[in-house]
Image: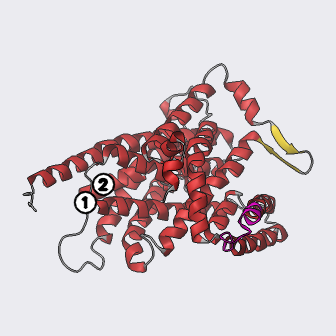
Amino acid sequence: MSQSPQSPPFLSLFRSERFPAIVLLVAAAAGLAVANSPAGPAVDDFMHVYIGIPEFFELSVSHWIKDGLLALFFFVVAVELQFELTSGQLNSAKKALQPAIAAAGGVIVPIVIYLVIANGSDAVNGWPIPTATDIAFALGVLAVFGKGLPSALRVFLLALAILDDIVGIIFIAVLFTSDVNYGMLLGAAGLVVLFGILSRRVDTRARIPITIALIVIGVVTWALVYKSGVHATIAGVALGLAMSQQPALHARHVLEPWVNGLVLPVFAFSAALVVIPQVSAGELSPAFWGVLVALPVGKIIGISIFGWISLRVGRREGPPALTFTDLLAAGSLGGIGFTVSLLLSELAFAEHPEIRDQATLGVLAGSMVSLVLAGVLVSWRAWHYRRLEQKTPATTA
């Protein structure tokens, strides 16, 4: 408990909810601006420079970012997921049922809308892109505009975003895996088990050597997963879920400001290095229009309607904790896809850079539309609840 006051001020800033979302937005805007400036070609060339051990393990700068750095982000997500599943808001079927139903709507409806728009085109494989929700952005909007909102809405949104992350992780693991080397994968699985066992001995006298061993095992596991053909970020997920909870929460505390202040902004910058096509609206790819519409519209419709149904499942007495308008606000927050949607865009169209770029533009534009809608709806609901609180007669002690 005493760790936070000892942290340097800039680290505390990156552990907050507001500032990382702002940095992420600025980084994406900077990437888009650089790509469309005279410096764009030089930066693009740099992103394709290979770094590593020649003929043994070499990746381009772009791949080091989305396969390497982003594995740290997924490790932090997995630690939070482990905590919520065991000790938090999703630690029982009863708690998880309502946000799970809403999350299902927030996945199914965007997919349907995307497929309707992209049907029959070469962009149809991008259907997973609008299914994700960016937790950092959503919590940032809540922190900026949500003063006065009931805790039930915050809890509902957090559970919703975590379940969305589970879906995104499954999509990455299942849909974007090819030519699996099962020997490498089995070796990685064995190291994950060893990682989990050693993490339960961190609090012994051998803390320092065990911590060093965990870092080495983590790096080797990541390399084996990458070589196996499974997307390397899954290594971060597996290690985060396998780690003993208390050391995992400490690791998350240490890594969080670096993930928020370095990993995610660098990824957002690199993913947004997209040249805006000089074409008319009618010439834009269905990938752009599908994501642009499916993120804000699909998420709002899916989360609000399925959420409304979920709040009536198993309800006993009294009104539901959230109203339909609260769910509209939650749906708009869910439409801020950003980080995971950008990664899914990179993976879905890895062999088609022109479609990938337009899908990326769709993610940025759709997330911005959702961000504006969320700001308006969350502010309105927060104002509504503050007014209710003011009208409620104060009870004197």
Q: Secondary structure at mark 1?
A: helix
Residue 350 seen by the camera: yes
In front here: 72 or 274? 72
Residue 239 part of the magenta-drawn span: no
Relative to 134, 353 lies left or right: right
Q: Residues within 10 Å of mark 1 (few under 14, many from 20)?
A: some
CA distance for labels 1 and 2: 6 Å
Please report the bounds of the magenta region as a residue range: 200-212
Please, is residue 234 above or below residue 65 in the view? below
Q: Which residue is mark 1?
A: 324
Question: For this view, does 32 lie left or right of residue 334?
Answer: right
User: Which sits in the foreground, 353 or 206?
Assistant: 206
Q: Is residue 184 left or right of residue 199?
A: right
Residues 87 and 41: in front is: 87
Q: Quadrant of residue 195?
A: bottom right
Vertically, is 264 above or below 178? above
Task: Tell me whether circle 1 and circle 2 mark residues in contact (CB < 8 Å).
Answer: yes
Q: Position of residue 93 (x, y in %)?
A: 42, 79
Asked if the magenta segment contains residue 204, the reply would be: yes
Q: Residue at x 73, y 46 (%)?
A: 63
